[in-house]
Image (spheres, rainbow, N blue to C red):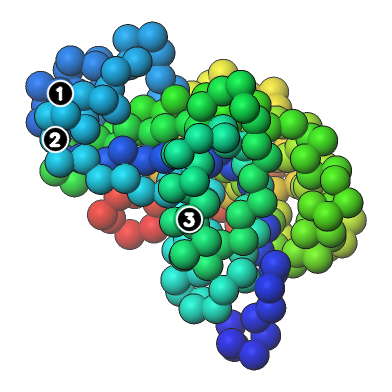
């Protein structure tokens, strides 16, 4: 993309803003919290102290996280021009949200958070073991995003002005109605709507809202595990990744002007 074509607010993202607490750990730490080496889950009661544990016992690093916010930070780094991206998500009114906003804005992302004062900002334990990464997310405030936020005139303008839209599958656990509203806007204006399968449990336990959004998805991302789980849940009857991608591309689609693209990553192997 030529730099002269770039303008503020071209790419709009929506997801769960989390403060990543990241550290290199050993297999014993994974076993302690009943985690797999390469997976993404939502925190349960047994994970209540995982971030504190990481901070005390390991050299944990704080990063402005959440998959969509991370992606927008990388996009800003690549495009090297402030405020090309806009981000919606919900945070608490605490020191963690201050860190999140400061880091995201320093990366060039125009964050437009919804704030609540009853729940703390969400966190995500990022456990690195060799080439593997295990994520354990406590959504907290991120789980309280409401469609009212994107219906505010000043935020609706960001949606109307965007040319590309990116949402994580994780956000299906929070506000599927917000996803559908943005997806329909993309469809009506013939603009690309991009989504990510995010984790196997999304295809398993949020199948209905995922398939409601699917007709609006122009570009779908996922890794090999997520794609395989999606194929199983949709009774594709194949484990061949290329065939799974073809089947996904052939699922019903609203915008017939755009052919769906499916991108499946396979770790350190070719896409």
Q: Residue at x 31, y 38 (%)?
A: 21
Q: Are marks 3 and 2 in contact (CB under 8 Å)?
A: no
Give the CA separation, mark 3 to mark 1.
31 Å
Q: Nearer the viewer, residue 11 or 92?
A: 92
Q: Nearer the viewer, residue 261 or 238?
A: 261
Where is the N terminus found, in terms of image quarters? bottom right
- Label 2 crowding class (10 Å Cα cut-off): few <14, some 14-19, many 20+? few
Rendering coords of residue 266 (x, y %):
34, 49
The image quadrant that residue 144 belongs to is top right
Viewer-nearest of discs 3 and 2: 3
Q: Earlier in the sequence, mark 3 or mark 1?
A: 1
Kindly identify which numbered label has been placed on residue 29. 1
Q: Quadrant of residue 187?
A: bottom right
Question: Disc number at residue 124?
Answer: none
According to the picture, the residue beneath numbered tag 3 turns out to be 102
Figure check: 153 above or below 199: below
Q: Which residue was labeled with disc 2?
A: 58
Residue located 56% across and 18% down the image: 205
Q: Are marks 1 and 2 in contact (CB under 8 Å)?
A: yes
Q: Is residue 67 above or below residue 40?
A: below
Earlier-in-chain disc, 1 versus 2? 1
Which label lies toward us, 3 or 1?
A: 3
Frontmost residue, 180 versus 258: 180
Real-space CA distance between mark 1 and mark 2, rounded to the nearest whole angstrom: 10 Å
């Amino acid at each position: 993309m030529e730099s002269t074509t770039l303008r503020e607010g071209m790419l709009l993202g929506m997801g769960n803003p989390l403060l990543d607490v990241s550290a290199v750990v050993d297999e014993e730490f994974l076993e302690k919290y009943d985690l797999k080496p390469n997976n993404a889950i939502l925190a349960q009661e047994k994970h209540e102290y995982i971030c504190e544990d990481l901070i005390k016992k390991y050299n944990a690093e704080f990063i402005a996280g959440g998959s969509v916010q991370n992606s927008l930070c990388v996009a800003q780094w690549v495009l090297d021009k402030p405020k090309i991206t806009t981000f919606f998500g919900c945070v608490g009114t605490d020191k963690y949200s201050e860190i999140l906003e400061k880091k995201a804005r320093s990366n060039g992302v125009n964050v437009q958070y919804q704030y609540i004062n009853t729940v703390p900002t969400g966190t995500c334990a990022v456990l690195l073991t060799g080439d593997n990464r295990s994520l354990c997310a406590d959504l907290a405030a991120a789980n309280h995003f409401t469609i009212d936020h994107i219906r505010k005139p000043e935020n609706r303008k960001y949606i109307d002005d965007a040319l590309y839209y990116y949402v994580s599958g994780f956000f299906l656990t929070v506000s599927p109605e917000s996803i559908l509203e943005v997806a329909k806007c993309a469809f009506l204006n013939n603009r690309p709507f991009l989504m990510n399968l995010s984790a196997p449990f999304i295809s398993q336990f949020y199948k209905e809202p995922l398939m409601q959004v699917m007709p609006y998805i122009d570009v779908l991302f996922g890794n090999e595990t997520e794609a395989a789980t999606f194929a199983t849940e949709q009774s594709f009857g194949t484990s061949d990744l290329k065939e799974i991608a073809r089947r996904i591309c052939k699922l019903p689609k609203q915008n017939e002007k755009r052919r769906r693209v499916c991108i499946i990553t396979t770790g350190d192997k070719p896409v």
